[in-house]
C-alpha cells in the first residue's frame, strides 16, 4: 500500500459538512466513493480539519492508503475531478511517508471568514459571504481581536461535540485580525486546532462589536466566563472557508 496525501477544495453549500454521515451527502462520503471507484478498492480518508454544513475549503488535506498497483497521482487527480467537479476539486495528489496523517501531522489550521458590509446584498455571493447591513468599525473589531490572541479556554465560544466529549476547549490563537477593501471585510484566524463552531462564534461577537452592539472589552469578559450563554449567536456557516492546513 502507498500512503497518499491529497489537497482538495470544495463548495460546502451542497454538503452536510465534511464528516461521513449516513443518509446525507457529505464531502468525505463523496470523496471516498469517487476514490474507491478510481482505485478499485475501499478508501477510508482522514482530513486535516472537519468542516460544518455549508462551510467551504480552499485547501483541505486528506490522507489515505492506496493500492500501489492502481496509484498514479496524475491519473487519480484527473479521474476524481471528472467525477466530482465543480463542487469538489482535487488540487494536488502525491505519495508521502507511511507515517503521515492529515489530522495528527498537522501543525496548524487557517480559516477565513467573508463579510459583505453593504446596504444591498449581492445574490451572486449569497453562498460565500455574510451580508451585514450595519456599518462595521474595523478598528473596534481588531481591538477586540487582541483579547483572543494567545492561549485561553474558549468554552464560551464553542459548541460541545458529542462525538468528542473529552476534547479540550483550551486553544492557542496565533493570528486573528480583520482587513477590509470597500464593502468586503475579511477575518483571518490561525490556531493549531479549533473547537466546534469556535471560529463562527468568534466572528459573531466580533461583528456585534463592529456594529456597536457590544464593546470591544466584552469579548474578553465573555471569554473569561467560559459560558456559551454569554456569547453572541454564531455567524452563518456559508461565509467561512478552511484556507490551509500547515505541516
Image (tube, helix red, strand yellow):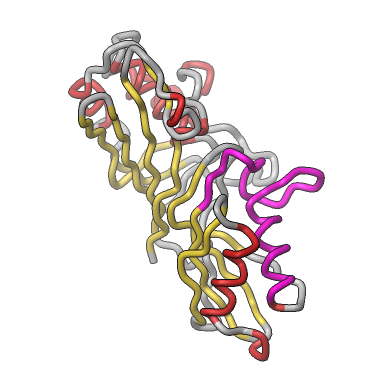
Q: Residue at x 32, y 11 (%)?
A: 134
Residue 88: image location, x then y, percent = 56, 55
Identify the image quadrant of residue 217.
top left
Q: Nearer the viewer, residue 12 or 154?
A: 12
Residue 158: image location, x then y, percent = 52, 32
Q: Residue furthest right?
A: 23
Q: Is residue 154 visible?
A: no
Magenta-drawn stretch contains 61: no
Q: Residue furthest top?
A: 213
Seen in the picture, residue 49 relative to 204 is either above or below; the reply is: below
Seen in the picture, residue 95 relative to 91 is either above or below; the reply is: below
**Range of residues picked out in magenta:** 10-38
Q: Residue at x 53, y 80 (%)?
A: 73
Residue 208: image location, x then y, percent = 36, 16
Q: Is residue 207 visible?
A: yes
Q: Nearer the viewer, residue 2 or 220?
A: 2
User: Would residue 173 be found to the left or right of residue 66 on screen?
Assistant: left
Magenta-drawn stretch contains 18: yes
User: Would residue 139 be found to the left or right of residue 165 on screen?
Assistant: left
User: Would residue 231 be found to the left or right of residue 159 on screen?
Assistant: left
Q: Residue at x 25, y 33 (%)?
A: 178
Q: Residue furthest left?
A: 139
**In the rendered view of the protein, which quadrant contains the N terminus?**
bottom right
Q: Residue at x 26, y 36 (%)?
A: 177
Seen in the picture, residue 210 relative to 162 is either above or below; the reply is: above
Amino acid at each position: 500500500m502507498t500512503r497518499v496525501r491529497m489537497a482538495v477544495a470544495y463548495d460546502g453549500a451542497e454538503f452536510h459538512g465534511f464528516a461521513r454521515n449516513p443518509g446525507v451527502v457529505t464531502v468525505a462520503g463523496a470523496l471516498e466513493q469517487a476514490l474507491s471507484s478510481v482505485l478499485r478498492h475501499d478508501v477510508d480518508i482522514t482530513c486535516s480539519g472537519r468542516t460544518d454544513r455549508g462551510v467551504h475549503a480552499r485547501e483541505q488535506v486528506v490522507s489515505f492508503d492506496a493500492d500501489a498497483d492502481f496509484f498514479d497521482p496524475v491519473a487519480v487527480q484527473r479521474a476524481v475531478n471528472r467525477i466530482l467537479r465543480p463542487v469538489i476539486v482535487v488540487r494536488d495528489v502525491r505519495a508521502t511517508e507511511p507515517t503521515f496523517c492529515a489530522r495528527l501531522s498537522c501543525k496548524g489550521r487557517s480559516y477565513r471568514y467573508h463579510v459583505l458590509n453593504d446596504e444591498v446584498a449581492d445574490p451572486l455571493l449569497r453562498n460565500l459571504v455574510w451580508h451585514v447591513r450595519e456599518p462595521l468599525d474595523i478598528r473596534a473589531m481588531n481591538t477586540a481581536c487582541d483579547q483572543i490572541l494567545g492561549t485561553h479556554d474558549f468554552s464560551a465560544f464553542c459548541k460541545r461535540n458529542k462525538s468528542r466529549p473529552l476534547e479540550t476547549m483550551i486553544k492557542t490563537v496565533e493570528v486573528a485580525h480583520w482587513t477590509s477593501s470597500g464593502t468586503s471585510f475579511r477575518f483571518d484566524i490561525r490556531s493549531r486546532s479549533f473547537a466546534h463552531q469556535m471560529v463562527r462564534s468568534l466572528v459573531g461577537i466580533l461583528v456585534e462589536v463592529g456594529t456597536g452592539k457590544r464593546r470591544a472589552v466584552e469579548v474578553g469578559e465573555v471569554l473569561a466566563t467560559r459560558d456559551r450563554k454569554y456569547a453572541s449567536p454564531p455567524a452563518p456557516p456559508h461565509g467561512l472557508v478552511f484556507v490551509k492546513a500547515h505541516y
